[in-house]
């Protein structure tokens, strides 16, 4: 009887270990966590983008403002990625240089979009000039 129960406990143990192992493997295969991606994005931003867009994303010119939720070239992740990879023709926004992986670019996109995460949507911005007094 006791031996029987031990065998059961052993089996349970083995099952738990197998499940834990599976979970760890899943974790490894899963994409980077948000925090890791944002940290990597910041690293690239600081190296490649900060000179023009400033560390707060406000940019040195209005069209460089990444915080205002006003997007000339779109704000879908694909749009941002395109701007980063190809630049904006005829402007100071040049294609990114350097040896970055797809994951790096995705991390950078995530970081760029974070600047405007708290901004109101464009429609909520005042469209009328301030009333004359
Ligand atoms: C030499 C200066 C310069 C650097 C460096 C630079 N940018 Fe830009 N960026 C600009 C300018 C100027 C514009 C505005 C282009 C326009 O008028 O459409 C712009 C536009 C953008 C836009 C589009 C904004 C919109 O309204 O659609 C994004 C996104 C962007 N930059 C991201 C980045 C990222 C990410 C990096 C780093 C990899 C970077 N930029 C590096 C100058 C720069």
Image (cartoon, helix red, strand yellow):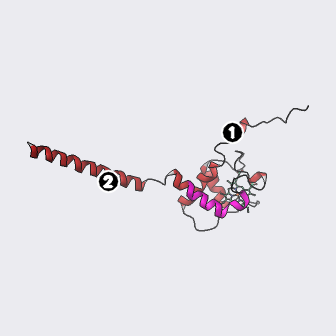
Task: Pick out the residue farthest to the front.
Answer: 2
Residue 80 spot, x, y in % from top left: 64, 53
> Toward the viewer: 92 or 52?
52
Near mark 2 (Cα within 10 A), the count class, few <14, some 14-19 or many ≥20, is few
Residue 125 locus on image (x, y percent): 75, 37
Which circle, 1 or 2, is nearer the viewer? 2
Q: Which residue is mark 2?
A: 21
Quarter of the N terminus within the rendering: top left
Disc 1: residue Cβ within 8 A of ligand 1's nearest atom: no
Q: Where does residue 88 sit, x and y in percent of width and height?
A: 71, 58
Residue 106 can be seen in this image: no
- Secondary structure, mark 1, is loop
- What crowding class fits label 1: few (fewer than 14 Cα within 10 Å), some (14-19), or many (20 or more)? few
Which residue is labeled 1 in the image? 121
Q: Would residue 25 appear left or right of 60 to someone viewing this image?
A: left
Examine the structure image and report whether residue 106 is included in the region drawn in magenta: no
Return the x and y of residue 29 as percentages of the image width and height: 41, 55
Pointers 1 and 2 in contact (CB under 8 A)? no
Of all residues, the one furthest to the left in this rendering is: 1
The residue lying furthest to the bottom in this view is 98
Q: Residue at x 69, y 53 (%)?
A: 57
Q: Which residues are magenta?
A: 38-56
Ligand 1 appears in which quadrant?
Answer: bottom right
Query: Mark 1 or mark 2, which has the lower sequence index?
Result: 2
Of 88 and 101, nearer the camera is 101
């Amino acid at each position: 009887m006791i031996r029987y129960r031990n065998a059961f406990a052993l089996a349970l143990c083995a099952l738990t270990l197998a499940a834990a192992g599976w979970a760890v493997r899943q974790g490894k295969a899963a994409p980077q966590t948000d925090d890791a991606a944002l940290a990597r994005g910041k690293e690239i931003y600081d190296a490649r983008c900060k000179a023009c867009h400033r560390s707060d994303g406000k940019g040195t010119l209005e069209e460089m403002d990444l915080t205002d939720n006003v997007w000339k070239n779109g704000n879908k992740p694909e749009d941002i990625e395109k701007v980063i990879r190809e630049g904006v023709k005829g402007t100071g926004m040049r294609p990114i240089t350097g040896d970055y992986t797809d994951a790096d670019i995705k991390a950078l996109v995530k970081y760029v979009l974070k600047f405007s995460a708290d901004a109101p949507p464009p429609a909520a911005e005042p469209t009328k000039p301030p009333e004359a007094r």
